[in-house]
Amino acid sequence: MPNDFNQQIIDEFRANNGAVGGWFEGARLLLLTTTGARTGTPHTTPLGFLPDGADRVLVIASAGGSSRHPAWYHNLLANPQVTVESGAFTYPARAEILEGEERDEAFARAVDTDPGWAAYQEKAGRVLPVVALHELAQDGPPNIRAGSFGEAIKVVHDGFRRELALIRKEMADGTALGAQLRVNCLTFCHGLHNHHTGEDLGMFPVLADRNPESAPVLARLREEHERIAAVVEELRAAVSSDGVPSDTDGAAARAEIERLATELEAHLTYEEEQLIPLLEGV
């Protein structure tokens, strides 16, 4: 059983689709459910995480700087099959302990973003393990914490809003683009591309078939997807470490993220206004 502090975070996380207040307000959090190494029972732990590309995230077994590895780490050593709750989505994952240069590079990115990780490692007197959680492919639609199609699209949109707000804050707080911030931006771009592709190929044709009168709305949304995709490509170029132009101070990336924020918020708001009433009838 989680302790009272963790249980409060878990309950708030689930009630608000990933948003929590207090000490962890604005933090990137997930819920990790492992299988007890000795008991075989499920254990859920709230953890901070680092985006790391399309199909995996990273967590660090810091235990708040304890000299011992946390229980969840021992659990996944015994059974690397875990469940991840990201706020909007719940999915099965495979845990992989990073080793050698890959671990060191990932940890350096974490420290560059938050020096607190280095303080935890110094306090612990041990090398803090870095764990990659690889999302496993599933049959059928994603598992979204929502009771209807209309609610599902709002939950997913709010997840994009929270992540974009975090990236904007990170860019505003720093004068240069660190390695992890670049990864955060590129991961966000990938997720947004996948979401819009799924809508174009899956949701929109169904809505067009069931609601022919929605054709002008769907046409506008597709046009907005194309416009946003162009902005995303500009952002990719600005943050890519080998992209052109080289942007050591982050000015071009900040400009593109602000442009994306403006375009995306208008798009999400219009889509919710127009599609949620239709989706509630699906």
Image (tube, rainbow, N blue to C red):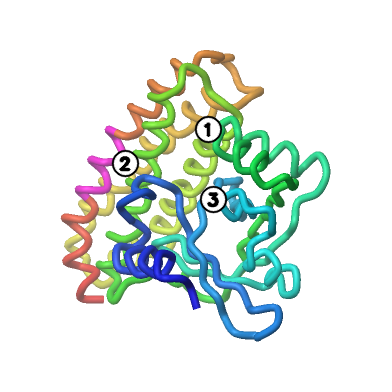
Query: Residue 224 has which mark?
Result: 2
Q: Which residues are magenta?
A: 262-270
Q: Residue furthest right?
A: 100
Give the residue at x 59% y 52%: 57
Q: CA distance from mark 3 to mark 1?
A: 13 Å
Q: Amino acid at mark 3?
A: Phe
Q: Which residue is mark 3?
A: 49
Q: Is residue 224 magenta?
A: no
Circle count: 3
Mark toward the start of the polypeptide (3 vs 1): 3
Query: Residue 145 has which mark?
Result: none
* Crowd rating for badge 2 (residues with CA inside 10 Å; few <14, some 14–19, many 20+): some
Q: Residue 179 at what x, y percent from top left?
A: 61, 30
Q: Amino acid at mark 2?
A: Glu
Please report contact status of discs 2 and 3: CB closer than 8 Å, yes or no.
no
Of the two numbered discs 2 and 3 in the rendering, the one whose residue sits closer to the viewer:
3
Mark toward the start of the polypeptide (1 vs 2): 1
Left or right, 2 with respect to 258, comes to right
Give the residue at x 51% y 52%: 48
Give the residue at x 48% y 43%: 188
Q: Which residue is mark 1?
A: 181
Q: Quick one: SS at disc 1? A: helix
